[in-house]
Amino acid sequence: MSDQKHIYIGLGSNVGDRLSYLQLAIDSIHYEVGSVLKISSCYQTPAMGFEGDAFINACIEVRTCLSAELVLSKLLQIEEQHGRKRFDDGQYHARTLDLDVLFYENEIIENQILSVPHPRLEQRRFVLQPLNDIAPDLIHPIQKESISTLLDFCQDQSPIEKRKESLQNPLQRFDFSAFNFIAIEGNIGAGKSSLTQMMAEDFNAKPIFERFADNPFLPKFYKDKERYAFALEMSFLADRYQQISDDLSQLDLFKDFIIADYDVFKSLIFSKITLQEDEFLLYRTLFYQVYKDIKRPDLYVYLHQNIDRLQQNIKKRGRNYERNLESDYLDKIHFGYLDFIKNNPQFKVKIIDISDRDFIENRHDYLWLLQHIQD
């Protein structure tokens, strides 16, 4: 999964229905750039550097996997799509939208197309005031001062008026309030952990991630399946039960929103594939003694990927012990999940085919997936 960067964008408009233009900008940023995490209040300030109608300004915090240069390119496209006209006379002009990259994490970027942090923002109250709403403790990497301190000592005395109107976060249009506990499942390499992380960050959920990296039997199993299968499955069952019990016991299942990248039932799915028949019968008996005490998810999301895409994803993440996984093994896992879903009608299940989607790298695919989970 690409590193997610926290960035801050300044928005302004002084033409037409200014608030509508700002909302259109936020909607477009949500769709093209990344998840909008925070939105400031709106502030009205006079035009600076030219005669024109007053601006309405705001700032937003966004999480994105795009480079700073690509973010700038997207913002320029959004400005143009919503009627921004540019002139070559070197003068300031009225504009439907003015979108600026203020900060890109704590990086200092200076090239032909981009200067970050945005030049002279510490001298502009119309930037500092809304930015202080959402990031008062953010440290300017050049000035070495927090936004709140920069605002306190700002020499700009231009009048500024806080508006009563507010802008809406497009993420609020997704509603998962019907669920307290969602389990994301799928084959090896389907993207379960990535989706869990992304949704947890966007919707303030408590994530639960399966612990597998430290399992001493896993590398041994991939080298000698028959010898280590039972030990592997028993250790996974014990660890999954312990983890999900410990994590859920610390949460309020009626108030907290929880997303896990596994459901404990996967232990039975994998064990049926890996174990000899007599071992599986013993394992199944032990499994149901454990499973009866475990909280079931309110929604079970199964991400279906075709085998070719799974193998590409597995190769990309580069775990040595997974590099020789055979298609037949992945097929058996897939049909094991389908058999579980078919034979457990009490589960609320969403099967979503993402074989032609890349929700990790493609923002549009991620939003498409969220919509399908909600629907």
Image (cartoon, grey):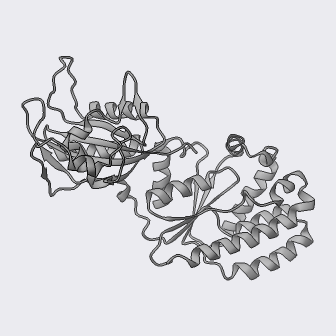
182 or 125: which is nearer to us? 125
Residue occupying image coordinates x 79% and y 44%: 323
Q: Is residue 41 left or right of residue 159?
A: right
Residue occupying image coordinates x 17% and y 56%: 165
Looking at the rendered image, the quarter that the N terminus falls into is top right
Q: Is residue 279 left or right of residue 246?
A: right
Which residue lies most toward the top here? 89
171 versus 2 height, above or below: below
Image location of residue 231, percent across then percent down:
86, 67
136 versus 233 height, above or below: above
- Residue 131 seen: no
Image location of residue 292, percent across then percent down:
69, 82
Image location of residue 299, percent across then percent down:
55, 68
Residue occupying image coordinates x 86% and y 62%: 229
Q: Residue 46 sits in which quadrant? A: top left
73 or 145: which is nearer to us? 145
76 or 247: which is nearer to us? 247
Residue occupying image coordinates x 21% and y 38%: 123
216 versus 158 height, above or below: below
Q: Is residue 194 left or right of residue 128?
A: right
Number of marks in picture:
0
307 or 152: which is nearer to us? 152
- Residue 260 seen: yes
Image location of residue 193, percent across then percent down:
61, 55
Q: Is residue 130 left or right of residue 350?
A: left
